[in-house]
Amino acid sequence: MQEKGGKGMAKKVVKIDPVKQQITRQLQPKKRVCAYCRVSTDSREQQNSFSAQLAYYKSLIENQEDWQFAGIYADEARSGTKLQKRDDFLRMMKDCEDGKNDMIITKSVTRFARNTVDSIQAIRKLKELGIAVFFEKENINSLSEKSEQMLTILSSLAQGESENASTNNKWAAVKRFQDGTFIIGTPAYGYTKGENGELVIQEEEAAVVRRIFREYLNGKGTYAIARDLSEEGLPTIRLAEKWNDGVIKEMLLNSIYTGELRQQKTMTTDVLPFKRQRNKGQLPQYLVEDNHEPIILYEQAEAVKEIFEYRRKQMGADDLEKYQSRYAFSSKILCGECGSLFRRQKIYIGKPYEKTQWCCRQHIFDSAKCSQKAVREDDIQWAFTVMWNKLISNYTGILIPLLDMLKKLRIDEQQEQEIGECSNRIMELTEQGHILSRLVSKGYIDHAVFIERQNALTLELAAVKKKRSQLLDNNGFDREVAGTEQLLELIRNNPHVIEEYREDLFLQSIDKVIVQKNGQITFRLINRLELSEVCRKEAAEDDAKAYANGI
């Protein structure tokens, strides 16, 4: 006799659908399909746009026998870079979680989200719920096979378009800096804006500014000044809850109080997520002297700077840039909840089990604004080691097809020709500028004529550079292609599985590390591909649970 379950017996397998799906098919035979779009912010155009898209999608969906119109979700087309500002998008996601929709139709990837991370996370979440997203322009169904890689690439392109728009806005702001026409949005504490946007002294706040400078020159520290102002209940900057020493330091070192206007003191990062940061020499600054009425004397400001510098040297403060580059993880770890950078910390100092961990800066300052937990450094190293070993074991099925697809997407002969024409024109205009400069220096042309022609050359040069930049962005994927090629070369030079964390591989392959709320650690590679691993602690807990269930 043959034993039960022997090799000779054919196994009968019966698929048992989840009860919820069975009931759903019986009670809701038609697929509930909704549409998502973005409409103009102008009130009249918004009404017309919404009505037109409502009629279009309602007709499109109702013409399908097995579809049922489940509504339309629309957000104002101000910016698609952050999902937090898109109320209807979030409402749609909530309705999908509640089982109200089975499918979403949207015009294109660029209308769905312009942030690659947000876009892919939303699509993956909908995938887990069994909900398809159909992109009309690209003819992609997110539930179809091999759709994820294409969606990642197309979302990156959408992100590039958003970054290009940001570049254009920054270029316009710099142009206004240069010709002195830039108008400050929010005046510094102590000033308000006049009818024409000029800075005018606000006497009540100016009295506080003078007091701060006076007390600091008399020997009081910034912490003590902030404490006294808060205790007295004096109005704070931008209605903050209380004064703090960081704000006092910024005010003491702000040249605006001497009548000078220094512009482009801060800058916006070039890639998503866009963030404001201090301009520490990466970009030029523009100083307008005698721009407005001063609140304090120039001599007072110089004396404050001398005292500040003396105290800084006495305290032995390190240069911030040197600190940020001391460790491999410095300025690389981002919080998946609030987007802030992580800070290095030592715990159990002096104990045999002393450890290093990294914690979200926002959480350190205010845990109510960010609940992200700290992650141990050795856990990040462990997760990277696991991710790297998986990558080198499967790179032929991941990186090589990705590189081929990127190269195919970026080929456009007409664009390449236009880019070449722009480059040649830029060279011609630059040479014409050099010739003009030589002519005026030798007195062959009048200075007024030189200025007129030079201005015309400058305007045309800026326009051609802008056009070339747009063509390059649209032709795109240079960074992705170059990054993928670098990764392939790195893997070919290091083909073997690693037993422990290697800092050199991390530095050469990783752009950012994102610590997710669910305990996962996402590694953004230099080609913008993102790969995730569970934290070692989480993995150990899962293994323990699996073992317990097995018993």
Image (cartoon, rainbow, N blue to C red):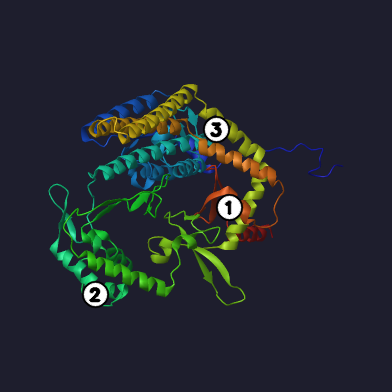
Measured from the top left, where is residue 333 in percent x and y? 50, 56
Q: Is residue 478 left or right of residue 311?
A: right
State how far apart marks 1 and 2 are (Cα). Answer: 47 Å
Question: Residue 91: percent from the left, percent from the top?
Answer: 36, 44
Q: Earlier in the sequence, mark 3 or mark 2?
A: 2
Quadrant location, the N terminus: top right
Secondary structure category for the residue under label 1: helix
Q: Which residue is mark 3?
A: 406
Q: Is residue 16 visible?
A: no
Question: Label 3 is placed on what type of residue?
Answer: Leu
- Which residue is found at the position 27% from the left and 70% from the top? 303
Q: Amino acid at mark 1?
A: Leu
Quarter of the image with the C terminus in it? bottom right
Earlier along the polypeptide chain: callout 1 or callout 3?
A: 3
Q: Is residue 405 left or right of residue 263?
A: right
- Alpha carbon distance from label 3 to label 2: 61 Å
Horizontal and vertical percent for residue 305? 31, 67
Q: Quadrant of residue 462?
A: top left
Residue type, mark 2 in image:
Glu
What SS does tag 3 mark?
helix
In-image side of 498 versus 56 (left or right): right
Q: Which residue is mark 1?
A: 507
Task: Mark 3 vs mark 2: give the one in front.
Answer: 2
Q: Nearer the viewer, mark 1 or mark 2?
A: 2
The residues tagged by marks 1 and 3 sit, at their Cα atoms, a distance apart of: 24 Å
Q: Can see residue 386?
A: yes
Q: What x and y, as percent, mark residue 364?
A: 42, 66
Any mark on residue 215, and which? 2
